[in-house]
Image (cartoon, rainbow, N blue to C red):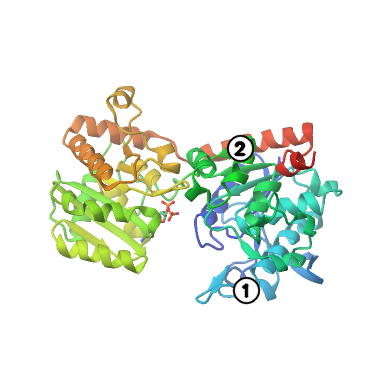
Amino acid sequence: MKIAFVSSEVVPFSKTGGLADVSGALPKYLAALGHKVAVFTPLYRQVRDKFKLVKSKQTVSVPVGAETVTGEIWKGAFPGTKVPVYFIGNDTYFDRDGLYGDAKGDYEDNLSRFVFFSRAVLEALKALKFKPDVIHSNDWQSGLVPIYCKVVYNDDPFISQAANVYTVHNLAYQGLFWHWDLPLVNIGWEHFNYRELEFFGKINFMKGGVVFADMVTTVSATYAKEIQSDEELGAGLQGVLTERAENLRGILNGIDYADWDPATDNFLTAKYSVGKLGGKAECKAALQKESGLAEKPRTALVAMITRLVDQKGLDLVAAIIDEMMKEDLQLVVLGTGLEKYHVLLTEMAQKYPRKCALFLKFDNALAHRIEAGADMFLMPSRYEPCGLNQMYSLKYGTVPVVRATGGLADTVTDATPETIRAGTANGFSFVPYEGSALLETLRRALAAYCDESKWSKLVATGMQQDWSWARSAAEYEKVYEETTAEKRANGTPSAVSELRA
Ligand code: ADP
């Protein structure tokens, strides 16, 4: 298959969040499956200055409102591969410090910037003679792509024959804009209604993507269900997502074992693997030392590595900290984020200096050392579209203790007598968003920790599981096949065609 992958951020070129990690990994794995993949992303200043790219002879011209805007096409590739990455350049829009904004907030012309980008990508496909079977767009920044395919390029088989797959990575950011800017989008007011682009009086790019795409995906099966049923998690789009239920899939992100594997991780004091866990004990001793905690090999070392934001369940930890500290455990927290959590955690660490260590910073090497040195990893998230840390923890033999939501529910199997017997248990989980539930679960985990044979079975199960991108890419491949087949058979299965029928 020929796959055009459209994303506003792609590792290693640009990144603000998880979207960049997915965009930097999935295309490479799709290419490894034998597909012809081309990635399209903006030429930000930081990319132009840092990476060696080749400027193509072709340019594209697209309308943004009444103006015709020209874009350059630059070509690069993922390092060490031949998978092409095409950068759409326009200095007025992308020669800036930030991707979407600066310290003052979002750029005021974000609507125009991503109108331009989305249309320019479609024109670039034609200029490059890359006729895709699938156009895979992501998050609000390329939410307009499926709309343009259906509304503007409907009579252009080069574009309209492609199946549109659209992935929601984060429903919290939908790309909302003032309705009077619709003329800049260059689609008619007839599309500004509650079934299509309109959202409480505003233009909603993500809603457009969800409504117009042939297939919608999100980053875990449980999150796919939650965003249809839960008002908070659906963020106002639950009705639209429910309408797309038949064409909505959850595909878990993968993790990159090239970076996260204790057998090859150069950040660690000692390397280890499932059959040879001696190195993990060394990593634990080293982490206790680095954290200023007593070097006690049989005291459970519990870790958190997280953005310090409301999503991550830190209020639950705060609620039970006094009870928690009565247990035979040590706690290490690495994170940065909201000031209120910096204060809260600092108070906690000051109150329990011998049992609680705190690192208020972003430090990737330390994150690796913590994953390796800890016995348990705590993720009591309020919601978690996918979550990566619990998958790293499983690979590092660090047993996750999580709230069963989103991707956490899909990756962590609670240790019950049945799951232990079946050999599927790999961690501990709870459902109610309550401190008491977290405490009870943590106590279950601590009890299991004291039973060495039970614990080593849990550790081994997690370490042997496959959370790789290869597995996720195979699932995307299936979705592409299904969507292209359905499109060939029935034309366009988007909600809009049903609406119009
Ligand atoms: P989210 O995307 O919501 O932040 P994930 O678990 O999906 O949560 O991914 C978080 C990623 O960021 C992980 O790779 C984690 O190790 C890393 N991370 C978060 N905070 C820090 C920090 N303070 N220092 C180092 N790495 C961090």
Residue 498: give x, y in percent of width and height: 75, 39
Local crowd at mark 1 within 10 Å, few (<14), some, or many (≥20)? few
Query: Mark 2 sits on what residue?
Result: 245
| Rendering quadrant holding ligand 1 | bottom left
Residue 333 falls in image quadrant: bottom left
Q: What amino acid type should be assigned to the residue bearing mark 2?
A: Ala
Q: Toward the viewer: 229 or 462?
A: 229
Q: Is residue 373 left or right of residue 184?
A: left
Residue 234: give x, y in percent of width and height: 53, 48
Do callouts 2 and 1 mark residues in contact (Cβ within 8 Å)? no
Q: Toward the viewer: 227 or 394?
A: 227
- Residue that lies at the very extreme toward the right in this rendered image: 155
Question: If the image is split into quadrants, where does the N terminus sit?
Answer: top right
User: Which residue is pictured at 21% across the width and 60% down the height?
Assistant: 357
Residue 270 visible in this rendered orientation of the protein: no
Tag 1, which secondary structure?
loop
Query: Mark 1 sits on what residue?
Result: 108
